[in-house]
Structure formats: structure tokens, C-alpha cells
Amino acid sequence: MSRPQETVPVDSPVPLSPIVVDTLEALLPGDNPVHCALRRQIPFTTMEEGCPCGCTSVDLWVDKTKCDPAPAHEGRPLADGNYVDTDVYAGVILFTSDGYLRSLEIHSWLEEPIRRWPDLSHLDVAPSHYQ
């Protein structure tokens, strides 16, 4: 699903949906410089839908002319969480590339792909050394 970030597809990216914005913000809590820098990128980010498996994962495209990269950081993925206390058996993973938001991947613990974003109130964010 990943594509080189240097080439943004023409007419493909769309504005971030509210649930994607809320999920990014939930995965990037606190006042750590890495999380703060990535949250500042959100207004300048578009998304490209259409994972081949049919899930709701999205590639993220940041307008690098409008914001700086996050400080150097390790971690692949940068952040992740699982949906708990719900009938949706899924998790979500945030990837970055060169200090910029890159993709938000939702995965199922079952065989069927997740076709809509689960209720964010069920997201349990894994502890991060960036928090």
C-alpha cells in the first residue's frame, strides 16, 4: 500500500475525514516534541483511500512546504492501539516517513477487513516512549 511520498497522485488525495483526524490526535497525545510536530502537520495533510484489501486504511500526504518534519525519531510504527470492549476486533497503526505522517493502517484480528472506522471511544492507545 505504501507509495513514494515524493510523488503525490494528481486528483487522488482528499481532505482528512473527521475520524482520521480524531484517530491521529488520539495516537499522538502529550507534549513530546515528536507528537507535537506530527499533530501540527494534520491541517496540511490529505489522504488517499483505497487499500486493495478493502479496509479503511489510508495513505497520508503532507504538504511539506507548509510544515516542518518532526524531530528525528525511531520506531516503526510510531504509534499503535487496539479497539477494546467492542465487537470489532481491530487495531490501528500510525507510520511516519522522514518526519512526516505517512499512513494510518487499520487491521483486523479476524479474516475480514475492517470496512469502517470503529468508534474511537474504544481505542486503547499503546504506551509510546514519545509520550
Image (cartoon, rainbow, N blue to C red):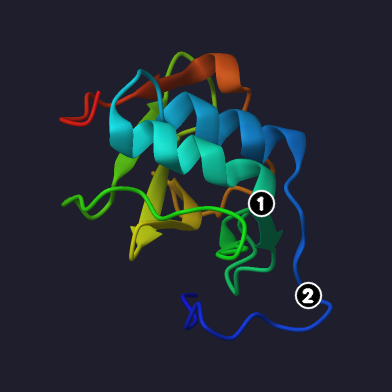
Label 2: element kind: loop
- Number of other residues with Cα within 10 Å of mark 2, as a class: few under 14, some 14 to 19, many 20 or more: few
- The residue lying at 23 percent from left, 55 percent from top is 76
Residue 20: image quadrant is top right
99, 66: nearer the viewer: 66
Residue 47: x and y in percent read 67, 59
- Number of other residues with Cα within 10 Å of mark 1, as a class: few under 14, some 14 to 19, many 20 or more: some
In the image, taking residue 92 as reference, residue 65 lies left or right, namely: right
Residue identifier under label 2: 12
Q: In which quarter of the image is the C terminus?
A: top left
Q: Where 113 sits versus 21, above or below?
A: below
Query: Residue 91: in sight, yes or no?
Result: no
In the image, taking residue 44 as reference, residue 60 lies left or right, namely: left
Residue 35: x and y in percent read 37, 34
Q: Which is in the foreground here, disc 2 or disc 1?
A: 1
- The residue lying at 60 percent from left, 68 percent from top is 51
62, 80: nearer the viewer: 62
In the image, taking residue 131 as reference, residue 109 lies left or right, namely: right
Q: Residue furthest right?
A: 11
- The residue lying at 58 percent from left, 22 percent from top is 120
Label 1: element kind: helix
Q: What residue type is labelled 1?
A: Phe
